[in-house]
Amino acid sequence: MEGRSVKVGAGSTAAHGRYNPAGPCAPQQRNYFATIQALSNMQITRRLEFDAGHRIPNHQSQCRHLHGHRYALEVTLSGGVIDASDRPDDGMVMDFSEVKALAKRHVVDLWDHAFLVWSGDQLVAEFLAGIPNHKTVVLERVPTAENLARLAFAILDPLYRNNYGNLLRLERVRLYETPNCWADAYRADKA
Ligand SMILES: [Zn+2]
């Protein structure tokens, strides 16, 4: 007894490859493969968030007051996609968990729930220094989104280099001060 009663003509079969698993899919797969090979160098981004206080002492509006933000840090790396089926990072530029771990250890853990104060803001810097065990980060420049982004870039740049032999490098650090305001720090030789 026939299991299927539907008969599909030759022309129809060619137009709908799913009815003929041995045939029409193969050319399309070759095209996808060529595209994948051409996209061997890619960018990946990992986002981390933290809370911190700051103020911009010379600012003319609200930012001169002591206040805080829910910051977001986005770390963008470029590199070759690792094509090695015997490696745990096969198919990746870098494991997202490792991207996160470095940014967390060297930036986010230091700044989270800290007050970020400019060393030239003596009034606040001295006040914070007088609070026992207060988590304070003293910066050489005013803690704007721009300065925090380029400081994070400077800290992270050497950490993401040459770890995997796939030309991995830090391309950009984006620092969100609010959901609507952010600053991008790019590497100096990008131009
Ligand atoms: Zn602010």
Image: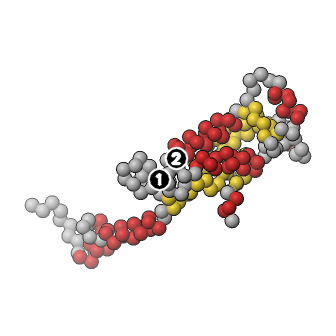
Residue picked out by circle 1: 92
| Res. 10 image quadrant | bottom left
* Disc 1 and disc 2 in contact, CB within 8 angstroms: yes
In this image, 111 relative to 21: left or right?
right
How far is the residue under mark 1 from the one under mark 2?
A: 9 Å
Q: Position of residue 143 (x, y in %)?
A: 78, 43
Q: Secondary structure at mark 2?
A: helix
Task: Check the picture and name the quadrant holding the C terminus.
Answer: bottom right
**Badge 2: few (under 14), some or many (20 or more) residues near its Cα, within 10 Å?**
some
Quick check: 12 above or below 161? below
Task: Determine whether, in the image, residue 112 is placed left or right of residue 24.
Answer: right
How many marks can you see?
2
Residue 67 image offset from top left, x and y in percent = 79, 36
Colour style of the rendered protein structure: secondary structure
Task: Give the residue at x 81% y 27%.
Answer: 129
Residue at label 2? 96
Between 53 and 42, the one lying in front of the other is 42
Identified at 55% across, 55% down, the residue is 168
Q: Residue 169: image x %, image y %? A: 58, 54
Q: Amino acid at mark 1?
A: Met
Query: With 181 as the anchor, is 32 left or right in this view?
Result: left
Instruction: Name, please, the residue furthest toward the left.
Output: 1
Q: Residue at x 18, y 62 (%)?
A: 4
Seen from the viewer's position, the closer of residues 164 and 33 is 164
The crowd level at tag 1 (other Cα within 10 Å; few <14, some 14-19, many 20+) is: some
| Residue 21 seen from this side | yes
Where does the N terminus fall, quadrant-wise? bottom left
Q: Measured along the vertical axis of the image, is residue 144 above or below residue 39? A: above
Q: Secondary structure at mark 1?
A: loop
Residue 135 image-quadrant placement = top right
